[in-house]
Image (tube, helix red, strand yellow):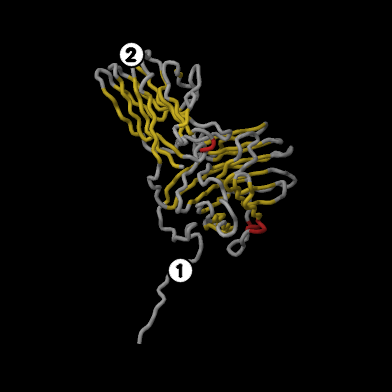
Amino acid sequence: MSYIYNREIQFADTAQNDAFGRLRTSEITSLLELKHTYDKQPLLESEVTDGTGESTHVDSTVVLQVSGADYIIRQSFASATYQPGKSQIFEASFAEFAITGGKDIIKRVGTFTSDVTAPYDTTFDGFFLESLGTTNDINFCIYQGGNAILTAPIADWLTSDYNPADIDWSLSQLMMVDYQWLGVGRVRFYMVIDGIPRLFYEYTHANSSTGVYMLSPNLPIRYELRSPGASGDTFVEICSQISMEGSLNSLYKPATIYNLTSASGLAAGAIYGILGFTIYDTTFRGVVARIRDISILQTTNDSYILRVIKNPVFDTISPTYTQLGASPIGYDDIGDSTYTLTLGSGEYVLESYVGAGGSLGGAKLELKDSEIKPGFAIDGTPDSYWITVQPLTTNATFRVAMNIEYFE
């Protein structure tokens, strides 16, 4: 006699599984994070305000506040890279999210963008949790290039695990969203209650709609507070992150730029911008890029200091960037004696190198990955990264090259 056994193992579809239904055993790869232990993270976050809108660093939080018909928005410069076929997790903590009686305040937290023109309240792309005082609803929303794909008020949330009506939105809260993109994947929204992610809404786009549910999966983290009327209120940004469930494979695209002709006859002590790059325009707002390495050749036996500077402010003229082929990289390779700058104008030096004189030759510098990556301010202004040199003797000559890697 023979027997057939059912050896199939099944797992319940809970938060123990990632957005693709896999048991969560993969290591998390951090892509983007914001915490405010010491300050408001001015190197990582862009901020715009209108009227009375302001923010204050208080006890590892950033308190957003408006007193009238104004707004304040805080958004990471960089976006998080998405790789198809891997689950992505967004988590954000916040406080004072409650709808205040008689007020029409709007509060939003999520990973999303908008148009780049004040008041930055159209063409949303991405997802966010929204406290909407104008209709007295708290909604989970998904937008695709300004089109509302989903608006799910508390009345539509799942209640089998926990009653969302019992959440006290005036207290500190932690939200979590895991999602697969592939243009048409699913999105699951949770609130973490008693340390447990409670699933409150699941959206599936495949076989239920057309097109994609958001235009880009590479999005920044954003908090915003708005008062359409005369009311005032506060909203507290605490901590947030985006991670990939699995490793970030090296599926980057390479690019290289160089300046071989113009940086000669430089004066001792002055700081010159030699070669710069940026993400070309807001068409490529979700691109994540970094400098992989730099090569420098000095042919005049001069000692020098090389610096890599974020957003240098040049003394007399501003750079003009050219798109590098069909890539999202913009570059300026005509830096010379006219591109001078004085440190202390708001620049941030990411890397420095002291080159010795007395011999001909070159040097190659490899830059490690870091959380300070080029991105965009809320108004669409791109970051720029420049190689600068400061010769220590007169009539120095330099040639430089920069290798870049980027994810789209």
Where residue 254 sits, quadrant-wise, is: top left
CA gap, disc 1 to disc 2?
A: 72 Å
- Which of the two discs, 1 and 2, labels the residue nearer the N terminus? 1
Relative horizontal placement of residue 391, taking residue 327 as reference (left or right) = left
Which numbered dot is residue 340? Answer: none
Residue found at the far bottom of this picture: 1
- Rendered view: 384 above or below 177: above
- The location of residue 331, given as percent across then percent down, is 45, 28
| Residue at the (50%, 21%) spot, across then down | 318
Count the labels in the image. 2
Which numbered dot is residue 10? Answer: 1
Relative horizontal placement of residue 201, taking residue 401 as reference (left or right) = right
Classify mark 2: residues with Cα within 10 Å, few (<14), some (14-19) or many (20+): some
| Residue at the (56%, 33%) spot, across then down | 380
- The location of residue 355, given as percent across then percent down, is 30, 23
| Residue at the (27%, 17%) spot, across then down | 301
Quick one: quadrant of the N terminus?
Answer: bottom left
Relative horizontal placement of residue 73, taking residue 227 as reference (left or right) = left
In what element is the residue under mark 1?
Answer: loop
Circle 2 residue: 393
The foreground one among 78 and 344 is 78
- The location of residue 216, given as percent across then percent down, is 53, 45
- The location of residue 387, given as percent across then percent down, is 40, 26
Q: Amino acid at mark 2?
A: Thr
- Rendered view: 277 above or below 141: above
Q: Amino acid at mark 1?
A: Gln
